[in-house]
Amino acid sequence: MGILNVTPDSFSDGGLHATTARAVAHGFALTEEGADIVDVGGESTRPGASPVSVGEELARVLPVVRELVGDGVRVSIDTMHAQVAEGALDAGACMVNDVSGGLADSRMAAVVADAGVPYVVMHWRAPSHLMQQHADYKDVVEDVHEELRRRVEELVERGVGEEQIVLDPGLGFAKRPEHDWALLSNLESFTALGFPVLVGASRKSFLMAAHGTGSTLGFPPVERDAATTAVSALAAAAGAWGVRVHNVRVNLDAVRVAAAWRAGGQASGTLAREVDQKR
Ligand code: PMM
């Protein structure tokens, strides 16, 4: 999943695709690099970001969604607002990516249930300007499991089909770096829940652990692609369904490495079984 933020203030690509023409060009570039889905967002969710009006969000994303869909690109809409999801679905988007998992807008479940499209339910606790005050966990893996389980239960009660749901542990959202790493290293416990799992690690500041310093200074977001690809390969090996990334080309290599690695393991398993049978 390639990231296309049509925002002035996202942490990595804010301002880069702020006009429709530039955003559309970048959407095509992501597809050419191999993205299966382009995730279009019109509101930054970085810690401390200020909310934008629904009207402004719609004005940013709709023309971009229309043009990309018109040229055959599969688009997901990254929004917490039912009205924006509805507009984007009408414009041809084929998936809703809701970082609040339906908590920010009580009408979202009905919109998604009605459309019958895949729905990314991310673990979320509070709006961006407050979320870092909510980063307290007894056991982050168990707590995120339990909170996602409750989200799924409520969404299904409201008519969303289980087959529509994709889960996302919500890296960086009400999480400290140690929480993000604990969730990643236990990713298999999420894939074992039986829903597809999406991982959004791309260029996030918790990756600074890979830089060997205690500071994000000198390790700006665009320099975090190598660390991101390492996470993508490991996430794919752990059974993730998708990775949401800024740099599609290198991350596609990473997930292909994971696929080849896994296929290699299966092939050598076959060989071992054949040897066994001949004995
Ligand atoms: N992260 C961001 C935005 N949307 N959606 C999902 N499902 N998962 C994420 O981790 C996620 C997201 C923030 O990153 P950005 O500013 O690069 O878009």
Image (spheres, rainbow, N blue to C red):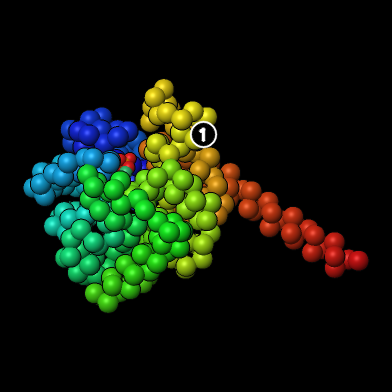
Work out whether 202 lies above or below 164.
Answer: above
- In the image, 118 versus 214, the foreground residue is 214
* Residue at the extreme top of the image, as rendered: 218
| Residue 225, percent from left and from top | 45, 33
Q: Is residue 123 above or below residue 180?
A: below
Q: Residue at x 47, y 67 (%)?
A: 193
Query: x, y (%) of residue 91?
Result: 18, 53
Q: Residues within 10 Å of mark 1 (few under 14, many from 20)?
A: few
Query: In the current view of this chain or complex, which residue is farthest to the right?
Result: 279
- Which of these two is toward me, 191 or 180? 180
Residue 158 lies, in percent from the top left, at 24, 74
Task: Give the residue number, with chain letter if any, for mark 1.
Answer: 210
Q: Which residue is at a point 16% across and 65% down the rendered structure image?
A: 107
- In this rendering, the answer to whether 191 lies above or below 23 is below
Left or right: 264, with 133 as reference point: right
Residue ranking furthest to the left: 55
Say which quarter of the image contains residue 238. bottom right
- Give the x, y percent position of residue 68: 25, 44
In this picture, residue 15 sits left or right of residue 261: left
Q: Quadrant of the C terminus?
A: bottom right
- Res. 76 visible in picture: no
Q: How many marks?
A: 1
Q: Quadrant of residue 27?
A: top left
Q: Secondary structure at mark 1?
A: helix
Residue 262 visible? The answer is yes
Q: Residue at x 47, y 53 (%)?
A: 183
Q: Nearer the viewer, residue 139 or 275?
A: 139
Q: Which residue is situated farthest in the bottom direction here?
A: 157
Q: Residue at position x 30%, y 52% from top?
A: 134
Front one among 194 and 74 = 194
Q: Amino acid at mark 1?
A: Ala
